[in-house]
Image: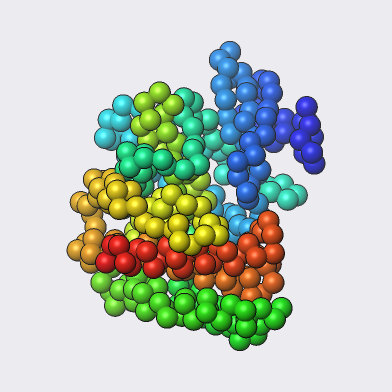
Amino acid sequence: MAFNDIPAARLRERFAAFLPNAEFISAEECYGGHINRTFFVDARVYGEKRRFVLQSVNKNVFKNYAGVMDNVFRISAHLGSKSLDMGSDDPTRDHIHFIRAADGGLGVDGEVGYWRLYRYIDRAEGRLSAKTPAEARAAAAAFGRFQWLLADLPSPRLWETISAFHDTRQRFANLEKSAEFDAVGRRAAVKDDIEGFLSLKSEALKLQEAFERGEIPERIAHNDAKYSNVLMDVATNRAVCVIDLDTCMPGLSLHDFGDLMRSMSCDRPEDEPDTSKIVVRRDMYDALLDGFLSQADNFLVPAERSLLPNSGVVITLETGSRFLADYLDGDHYFHIDYPEHNLVRARSQLALARSMLDTLM
């Protein structure tokens, strides 16, 4: 048993740093993620066979990995406390349970990654995309509940693990700088695309400006709200819990709802080359809104509720501007499968934002 550059002996060593008295049985790598290395480990603990998730956090992406770990442990502990206080009928599966290292630390530092361990959640799975309004509603409700449960997380403030992640003004400034510098000579061919994004800059800044005016508060946001980050019960299709907490940090509630809209309100992929096919599904949007408000309505302020439809436009334009800037820079940030991939993505996002404005506003 070996995993390319990580020998089995190393996995045993890392696992033993958390549970030294457990019997390591086997491990298999999960290839679903793009940033961290993840392994499912089967072990025997006090005679009982159990499964765990052993993960190596990418320190090149999460340079403040200590802050990431502090955040996720605090979130996990708070959700666990809430689960007990509220009499959850599924306390072993309704949140991620992180396990401290045997020396009391939050994890184990390695040469490349920072290792951590948490309990495997059985009888549940992550799915790539929602096919029906019912699935969309369940996912949105899970994220709404996630925000509601974290609304009273005690101070101090969570670490900002990715600086200015949703600074939309800066994202658009970066696009303008990329267009002006024109590093690889692509500006002339995409002049209409650049103008298309810049013409909607006022729409893209609506959340940030509302926050700056003090109309909407800072919240704890997940910052990667999509269907694949909700585990679904394999038997009942019920949302079990929200996962992938590394991007959780201070932000806006509307950032998460905007992510849900961007990723789930259209049934075409984010790199759909035929923009005529990119149309918002009103039934999916209505399901997302209903699901999110079913859990979050009791803590959102009126300005947040009124800006919910705008949030999808904001996040979609912000994401698209990043694709286009990367294309102008020579494709250094996002992985691409062909030379025009980032341009196709940018055009798809611009079309989706325009459909949102036409359909929902």
Q: Is residue 109 left or right of residue 212?
A: right
Q: Is residue 178 left or right of residue 86?
A: right
Looking at the picture, tell me which residue is in the foreground, 61 or 339. Answer: 339
Using the image, determine if residue 205 lies above or below residue 159: below
Q: Is residue 263 left or right of residue 189?
A: left
Looking at the picture, tell me which residue is in the foreground, 80 or 321. Answer: 321
Give the x, y percent position of residue 220. 38, 56
Using the image, determine if residue 6 lies above or below residue 246: above
Looking at the picture, tell me which residue is in the foreground, 110 or 214. Answer: 214
Q: Quadrant of the N terminus?
A: top right
Q: Quadrant of the C terminus?
A: bottom left
Q: Which image quadrant for residue 90? A: top left
Q: Which residue is at 62% across, 49% downward?
A: 34
Q: Which residue is at 52% across, 31% downward?
A: 119
Using the image, determine if residue 311 lies above or below residue 177: above
Q: Is residue 103 left or right of residue 92?
A: right
